[in-house]
Image (cartoon, helix red, strand yellow):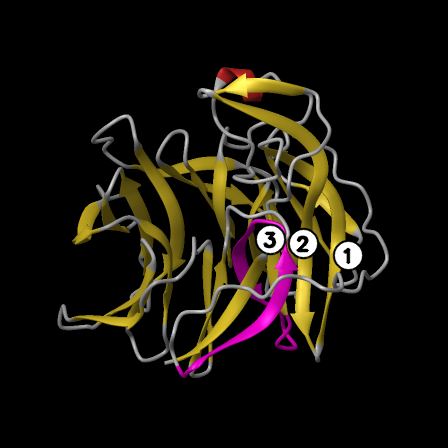
Amino acid sequence: MAVFGLVSSASPMRAAEPEPAVPAHAKVEVVARGLDSPRGLAFGPRGELYIAEGGRGGRGPCRADAGRRVCSGRSGAITVAGFGRQWRVEAGLPSLASPAGAYALGPSDVTVTAEGDPVHTVRLGGGPALRSAPERAGMARLNRHGAALADLGAQQTPADPVAVLATGQGYLIVDAAGDALIRVGRRGRVQTIATLPRRTPATEATSVAEGPDGAYYVGERAGREGRIWRIEPGRAPRVYASGLRGVIDLAWSPSGDLYVLDGTDLLRLGRRGTRTVVTAGLTAPGGLALRGRFAYVSTCATCGGTGAVLRIRL
């Protein structure tokens, strides 16, 4: 696991950033902008929004991976938006991206514990070339002021931790490399909860949410197809929803509806199986969180410097 340093001081947003692409929807507004490959989102105890920024790579070293050139750097970050401003509570996290700073791998998701401490994952891919890099994937916990409290599961963290969720028993991690849902206990004990059947080499688990029934729901994409799995510990996973384009993230509302980032659309899956498009035409969405009557979606998740978070009225 990478060693996570202490956070830099609060950083104001960069000036003169390009306007983010916003779908033609009267109920959409921008709440954060100028982000580097924004991915997972989570709300803190005071309503502040934590954003995992994948970064834009760096000066290197560079190498070939999966047919493209990637360069490493320390441009990943965790940003907070709230109270009329945005600032980074942690900077200098590992990042891999193209020389132009696009399609980054780095901080991939963030969650907030019952104590109000954010926990984030760093994803650097699951291939042998990336696993042998000096900076490896991992998970770290901060306090609300950004000071590093602990690295979690340092010796046993999944190879490609794409999503994380805080629970009463510790943390759930989605390992994209193994298509598995893994629990990391508060004392660091690691346990595989479920492994999803792999349909194709492109199949990848992407996200996790706890349902109102206490089960865990894991999103998946396989090429241009996507499914959602329902997982109860001790039982085989079963398909909850299929026929999707490719699940990026999901979240349950208090009313019992499941909201899904599917391809470039935000969908609502009703309790009786209905599917409604809430907002279509999102630009490379990367993460989803719900609060009150709004959905918050990170967009331009493959862009260095022009990412944003949209607030969408439901």
Asked if the residues shown at circle 3 and circle 2 are in contact, with their CB atoms under 8 angstroms apart, the answer is yes
Q: Quadrant of the C terminus?
A: bottom left
In this picture, residue 188 sits left or right of residue 282: right
Give the residue type that dot 2 points to: Ile
Distance from disc 3 to disc 2, alpha carbons, whole Å, reads 5 Å
Density class for disc 3 (Cα within 10 Å; few <14, some 14-19, many ≥20) is many
The part of the image, by quadrant, that contains residue 251 is bottom left
The part of the image, by quadrant, that contains residue 121 is top right
Q: Which residue is mark 2?
A: 78
Give the residue type that dot 1 points to: Gly
- Of tags 1 and 3, which is closer to the observer? 3
Residue 201 in percent (x, y) is at: 28, 25
Q: Secondary structure at mark 3?
A: strand
Density class for disc 2 (Cα within 10 Å; few <14, some 14-19, many ≥20) is many
Distance from disc 1 to disc 3, alpha carbons, whole Å, reads 13 Å
- Is residue 302 among the parts visible in the rendering? yes
Query: For residue 97: magenta?
Result: no
Q: Which residue is mark 3?
A: 52
Circle number at residue 146: 1
